[in-house]
Amino acid sequence: MEDMSAARAATPSGAVFLSYASEDSEAAARIAEALRAAGIEAWFDKSELRGGEVWDRQINEQIHRCRLFMPIISANTEARDEGYFRREWGVAVDRMRDMGERKAFLVPVVIDGTGERHASVPERFRQVQWTRLPSGEPSPPFVNRIAGLLGDPIQVIPTDGSSRASASILQPRRPTRQTIWVGVGALAIAIAVWLGWRQVGPRAPAASSNAVEKSIAVLPFVDMSEKHDQEYFSDGLAEELLDQLAKTPGLHVIARTSSFYFKGKQVPLGEIAKALNVATVLEGSVRKSGDHIRVTTQLIRVDRAEHLWSETYDRDMRDVFEVQDDIAGAVVKALKLTLQVGSAPSDRTANTEAYALLLKGRYLFYEQFTPQSTRDAAVALDRAVQLEPTYAAAWAQLARVYFHLADDIDTDPGPDIELARAAIKRAMALNPNDAATRYISAHINMAFEHDPQAAAADVQAAERLDPNLTEPLLVPLVLGCVSGPCFEQHIRSLSRDIERDPLSALAIFDRGFMRWYGGDLVGAESDLRRVLQISPKFDSAAGTLAELLIMQNKLDEALPFATAEESPLYRRWALALYWWAQHRKEEAQTQLNALLANDALDGAMEIAEVYAAFGDKKSALDWMERDYDYRRTGVLYFGTDPMLKPVADDPRFTALMKRIGYPLKVNAPN
């Protein structure tokens, strides 16, 4: 028949009913065999039984008698709008109507990269913890979990005889609101076990064999709230946990940009692990209702197809920071490493509404990143600091948002500059020992205050406070460092960041930018091509690549990138430089005229570069001074921009650098 669901014979109470599409019968068989080997009765049969009223009644009876119902979810079930397994799923959901909320009955198992949020399953399936078994390979912790749900704890011993944590630790619990996060110790033990286990058995071929052993990627948690309106909150919790783990010496934690790169994409875990070069993935979901949250997590050793651990937690929102600390502390204790938690208490507040608004502001700014979402982020963050005036993290994020708005296209920067100044002043007063805050202060001191000494002091303080948190592009721009040991140091710093954030288009762009400013046009070209592979619409990347190709006299290659640039400002800039390089002055002047007509407020720096390329030093310096007067961020680049080298010998350039207070070791590359 088309779908084989489960053994269709009388079975003892306490059995597990496996429901699956016929295409997944081999995976279901592996799961059933592992359960049976542990003494757990599993309803699984590959006999060619036929449907009919008698058969339907038998299946109905078995679903109503089973202790656990285990739907096998995959791309195969997603591809089929109809199938007998869907009837079985409906019967199971009907039975759940008479069950208490905390009764363990439904155990969904995903055997590939099918995503939870958009899967074609009954809504009740989304209300419980999902288990991922890559390729349907059951692991001892998975079997232990099923035994625990059936009320019969066991210990599954690996086939190689190695020692493992007791099943009682790995068993799931259904904790109360008061005791739920005691279970985070299980997560810690699971990760410790991950570091030491060596299991004989099938391995997932998709994972990289070169993955760093002590490595983890925290994927964005799925928003399982009824209205799906808590994405910012679920993302924020995952990011907070990621940040805590990133402070653990000896643990390679993939940074947020790369961990979140696959958000909303149906990509198998094996491919994710391979792309990020990690052995282990932590994923989960969040359901928030009022002041109550339910969080599910599971830890998967992808390269060995091992489901190491999973748990469901309930908690009051007022304890959200305790939740984060408990998880991080338990993990560190299990790993026997030192975690520097608590040195920067900027994210701590007793006002959970203010915390939620901080998460919303970050989400709107970093994830949406449109002019409107940035304004909306400012509104959310402003509300956060109104609710909690001593919330340093919210003040710092508000300063960053206003800094960006002050440099936005076609807006008067004055009001936003003042708001950025006020916000960073407040953040620094509340918590001067936060590295991220010091970096924001450095940007503001350099661009708005024209005070490179204060900016350099901020950068140096940030590096001391948290060497792992860097904004490397800012450092050489502030210090005028584009050659020699200083330059190489910052290239290494960027490369280190890219290693832990391999899909961060921004980090790779920064390194390409630095290489360009340092005279390494080939390396810069390679980085910018990679940026466009990851993010084809990355602002200014195509235009900058076109300019690099022009500088290498690769004119035929440059034009497609110049015309493909998404930003009108950078497209006009790149085309002006391209046509000038082709000695087609009329077309070049047309693009410059378009810049002057459309981008005079925001594009003063780019207009200055075009005039410098045209050999018009006076006009170039006029526009540089205009950028300085506007307090735009172009001032960050004056001393190191290789495109301004034609004006570096002009007395007006020297005078402008002195006014800014910029180091005079500029335009070093030949």
Image (tube, rainbow, N blue to C red):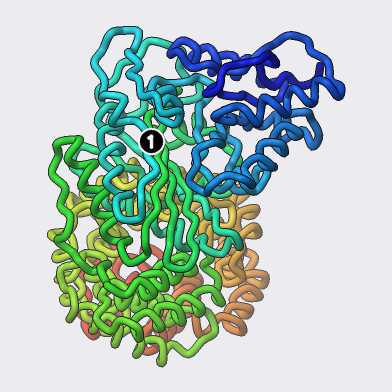
Answer left or right for 604 relative to 44: left
Q: Is residue 208 visible?
A: no
Answer left or right for 316 relative to 12: left
Q: Is residue 110 visible?
A: yes
Residue 32, picture quadrant? top right
Where the C terminus falls, by quadrant? bottom left
Please report the residue visible at 24 percent of the width from the left and 81 percent of the height from the top. 390
Q: Nearer the viewer, residue 39 or 122?
A: 39
Q: Is residue 380 above or below residue 562?
A: below
Q: Nearer the viewer, residue 239 or 529?
A: 239
Label 1: element kind: loop
Q: How many numbered marks does the figure carry?
A: 1
Q: Residues within 10 Å of mark 1 (few under 14, many from 20)?
A: many
Where the N terminus falls, by quadrant? top right
Please report the residue visible at 39 percent of the width from the left and 56 percent of the height from the top. 237
**Picture coordinates of residue 404 (x, y %)?**
42, 75
Please report the residue visible at 25 percent of the width from the left and 48 percent of the height from the top. 328
What kind of residue is marked 1?
A: Pro
Answer left or right for 603 relative to 249: right
Q: Nearer the viewer, residue 458 or 295?
A: 295
**Picture coordinates of residue 220 (x, y %)?**
46, 50
Q: Nearer the viewer, residue 450 or 306?
A: 306
Residue 421, picture quadrant? bottom left
Answer left or right for 395 relative to 373: left
Q: Is residue 159 above or below residue 43?
A: above
**Picture coordinates of residue 280 (x, y %)?**
38, 32
**Picture coordinates of residue 17 (x, y %)?**
61, 24
- On the image, numbered disc 1 is attached to which residue? 172
Q: Is residue 70 above or below residue 393?
A: above
Please report the residue visible at 28 percent of the width from the left and 31 percent of the height from the top. 169
